[in-house]
Structures are given as structure tokens and as C-alpha cells.
Amino acid sequence: MYGRHPAPARKACIVSEPVRVRFAPSPTGNLHIGGARTAIYNWAFARGHGGTFVLRIDDTDPERSTEQNTQAILRSLRWLGLDWDEGPEAGGSFGPYFQTQRSESYASALEKLKAAGHAYPCFCTSEELEAKRAVGRAKGGISGYDRTCRRLDAATVSARVAAGEPHVWRLAVPEDRGDVLFTDPIRGDMSFAAEALDDFVLVRSDGTPTYNYATVVDDAEMAITHIIRGDDHLSNTPRQILVFEALGLTPPTFAHLSMIWGADGKRLSKRHGATSVESYRDMGYLPEALLNYLGLLGWSMDGETTVFSAEELVHSFSLDRVSKNPAIFDEEKLDWLNGVYIRELDAAAFTDRMLLLLESEGLLSVAEAAGKREWLESLAPLVSERVKRLDEVVPMVRFLFGESVEIAEAARDKVLAKEGAGTALAAALDVLEAVEPFTHDAVEEALRTVPATTGLKPKVAFQAIRVAVTGTTVSPPLFESLELLGRDRTLARIRAAMPLAAR
RNA sequence: GGCCCGUUCGUCUAGCGGUUAGGACACCGCCCUCUCAAGGCGGAGAUCACGGGUUCGAAUCCCGUACGGGCUACCA
């Protein structure tokens, strides 16, 4: 039994300052599984420490960023049950929360860096840079910028700038900086050699900030204390630390999550089918299940507990139990977990879900649904116990809607064509006509006489009836199904199936 | 090429110097049973990537190697 132990309390850890974390998606697509997990961990960390969860939209790529994507991301986060204290639609005093609206911040931070001598213009063309890189690489792997323009004298620089010569602004990494060291709560002590640090570009020739610069300006201004993000940013961290330092600030804590991979061990992409949160919603996963699964993918509560609520996650989440190795997304385990949550739904809640599905499938109108509430609620437990995903509901209950049913060819061959099937149907017809009231107990009592009178095995007799009535070999329990279907339709369907059955 | 990260059952993980290497999913068997599920019980499945050290003792500490991944852009 997977069990629901009381969530273990988080280990005491050295998180004292008021925590401020952020999730900063780029609206170049909808929220995918990896981003969702990053958001969940940030959210859980903030909530668990009484901190603030900031949502910032990194929409600096005008080509691919869209308002629809932003909306889809917000919708996905809400669907998962995540709420943010500052950001789009929430406001906050550290805004704006869209990078495209923050150009003033990037400009004024650049002025600050210039004034302090921490940034300098670079006039090198991309061709020149490429050539330098090629040489450096051939000479043993040095790939950083060679600081040509850093050595230009002030007069030359102002003359070239005044002449309107295109230039970028680079960070002037202090000559004596030494190695960049930091401690990642997930991965431990990290060290990057000074030689590997180069004067990277802060501001492009068109005046727009680069990612490593914009992100730091924003994180600094938004007073972010813990940056929890994917480990594709691990190598960017030393660069960002240098920007914090150039700005005269103490860098926040950086924690890096490993990636989520597809079943083939490759980076999760469209090739793997569904990757967006909304596609999982549409396939019939419950938000609680997805949150639980993602929470478990790369983090463990105690090594034993696999089923937990968002509240329990918040209560026990800690960065030191996040695992360092990449995780493969296992849809089978998600399915199982989703089944657990579906079974936890009570009849009323499951009926609500079922109604939406039936209506969108055209099996039930909203008007009809009102009168059938009770009927649906008695159907609910029969179905909820048997599905792992909500999209399995309609196929399972379809036989209850409509007068007749089409008998699947395979079911007919496998069951009705077998000897005794017709005998069973005839006997069933016989006893069911007299059943009053037509409840599952009474139906069961009546049908239990069929094997006795016909000499057929119960399994054989009941399967024949099941196929006749539901059209398939797999269905919710027979007696309950017949009650829900009602006497008239039950008898009609048995009669209709008689000609197809072997004697 | 250089730098950085990772490597425990098929999958997600527990483990933080001494365990019969634990749990969950999936798988197999049995029970329950009108089908399918659910549930119960049990089973199989990991030479802890490999090779060296350190130690009385290593999955756990150190060093290499291999493999996988990331960064190395006027992408994010």
C-alpha cells in the first residue's frame, strides 16, 4: 500500500531571510512539463518558507513571444493550483513584470556599470569575433573574448561612439577576480576557473539587453533571494554572479534542477507527443495528479511516500532532497497516480467531471443532465474505479445512452458465437421480465438462477448477457449496469442479440 | 576543443563508512470475482557505469576512464 503517511516536516535549513523566488517563463510556447515542475518547486519553496512567489514573463524575444502563450501559461499555472503573489494580473511593487516593459531598468543599470567602469563598448564585428573564436579554440580551447576593445583608450572610444559606430556593451570582468565559487543547495560547491570567464555582451548593438544581463537586473530589482531553475543555466551562473558583483550586489542563492527527459532518454520535445500542461489536462489528467507526479519527479519526500497533496508538498519540500540526476518522464506512473486521484473523487465530484465529458460528446444535453443527476451519481463509483484517465469515461458508459447498442464484432465472435450463449440469453429474458423492482439486487437474484437452470458456467452466461446489453466484453459490473439501463432497454437489447447468438 | 554537471532494479527514487541495498510504477503468480478494474498476498528484478586508490570495512570518501547532458552567441 502506497499509504498516506503524515508528511514529514522539512529539515531545519539555513533559510532565514524573507524568501522571494520567481518563475520566469518565456512566452514562446505554452507551459511544458519541465517548466511546470520548475514552477511547482519555486512555488512550494516560497509557500513553505512564508515567502513571496513572483511570476515574471521573459518576453524579450519579440518574434516568438505572444499574448496567447502568456495567457496559456497563466491558465496552466492556475489549473495546477499555483498562485503567485506578484506578476501579471497580481500586480506588486517590484513591477513591471514583463521584461519588454523594463527597458528603463536595463538602461539605468548600464549607466551605473559604465560609471563604475564595469562595462565598456566593443566595436568588434561578428566576423572578427568568429575569427578570434576559431583561433582560440584551435589554440587549446580558449573561447572567451580577447578584450581587444577593453584596451582602447578613452579618446578613441568616445570618438568612435560619437561617429555612430555600432557597438555592444561588454562586462569588464575584474582582472583580479579569481575563480567564481558558489554553493548550490542541490549540487553542492561549484567552482568556475577565472580563465574561463570572459567579458560577455550585456547590451546588444540595437540596445536590447542579453539574457544573462536582463535576468540579473530583474532578479536584483525584484529582490529575488533564491533562483531555482533548470540546470541548463548552471554554466550561466558564474556570468550572472559577475553582473551582480559589478552592480555592487550580493548574488542570491542559485539552485539547479536537472532536466526531464522523454522515455527514450532524449530531451523532452514535441517528438514525445504531449509535453504541454494543457495537453495533459485535455487527456483527462487531474491537476492534483500531475502536480503530485511532477513533485515526485526529481524530488522525494522521504523515499517512501508517493501520494501527497499540494499542501503536504509545501510542508515538506526542501532543496536538499532534490535529486541531481536527470529524470525520465514515466507516463505509466502518472497514469497510476491519476487513477489514485480519480478514485479519491467522491460521486458528486466525479459526476461533475462526467457531465462535462458527456455534454461535449453530445450524449447528454445540459437540460437532460439536471434530471439525471441522481442516476449519474450512482453510475459514478462504477466508472471512477475503472479509469486511469478521464478520457476513458465516455467509451465505458456509452452503452447507457441511446436505445440500441452496436455489438462489436470481436465480442460477437468471442462470446455470442459460443455454444450456450443463446440459451443464456433466452433464460435471462425469461427471468428478467418478472423482476420487480428492477434494482441490481433483484436483477442479480434473478440472473443467478440462469447458470443453475441452463447448466452453464456463471462466467459464460453472464458474459453473453453483457455482450448483448453493452455490446462489449468489458463493462461496469453487470447487475448495476442493467439497473441503470432499465428493464425496457435491457430486454430489447437481449432480444435484438438473440439472432446473433449460438444455441 | 575548453569548462561544468550527472551515472543505485526497465522507470522514479531511498541510502549520506558497517543494511539480507528499502519503497513506488511497470512486470509475473495466487486470492477475490459476472468482464474489466480496484483490493489483498507473494515473486522476479540493482555485480550500486567502469578502473584504481583511502579504510579493518565503501553504493557512500578521493583520483582517473567511459557514456549522457549543459554552457562555450549581439538565443533564452
Image (cartoon, coloured by chain):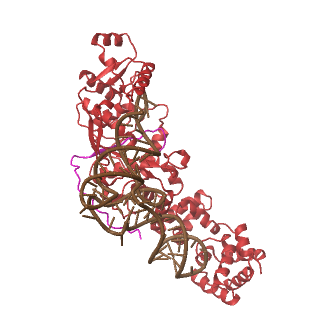
Q: Is residue A452 magenta?
A: no
Q: Colour of chain B?
A: brown
- Specify whether residue A28 is in view: yes
Which of the 4 quarters of the picture holds residue A149? Answer: top left
Q: Is A9 located above or below residue B40 in the figure?
A: above
Give the chain ID for the red colour: A
Pick whichever, A254 or A114, lies toward us: A254
Q: Is A453 located above or below residue A412 in the figure?
A: below
Q: Is residue A23 magenta?
A: yes
Q: Position of residue A359 (x, y in %)?
A: 58, 59
Q: Position of residue A67 (x, y in %)?
A: 47, 38
Q: Is A120 located above or below residue A370 in the figure?
A: above
| Magenta residues, start to end | A1-30
Q: Is residue A329 left or right of residue A4?
A: right
Which of the 4 quarters of the picture holds residue A366? Answer: bottom right
Q: Position of residue A48 (x, y in %)?
A: 29, 54
Which residue is depicted at the point 39% across and 13% down?
Answer: A165
Q: Principal SS element in the magenta part?
A: loop
Which residue is depicted at the point 51% across and 60% down?
Answer: A332
State the quadrant of the C terminus of chain A: bottom right
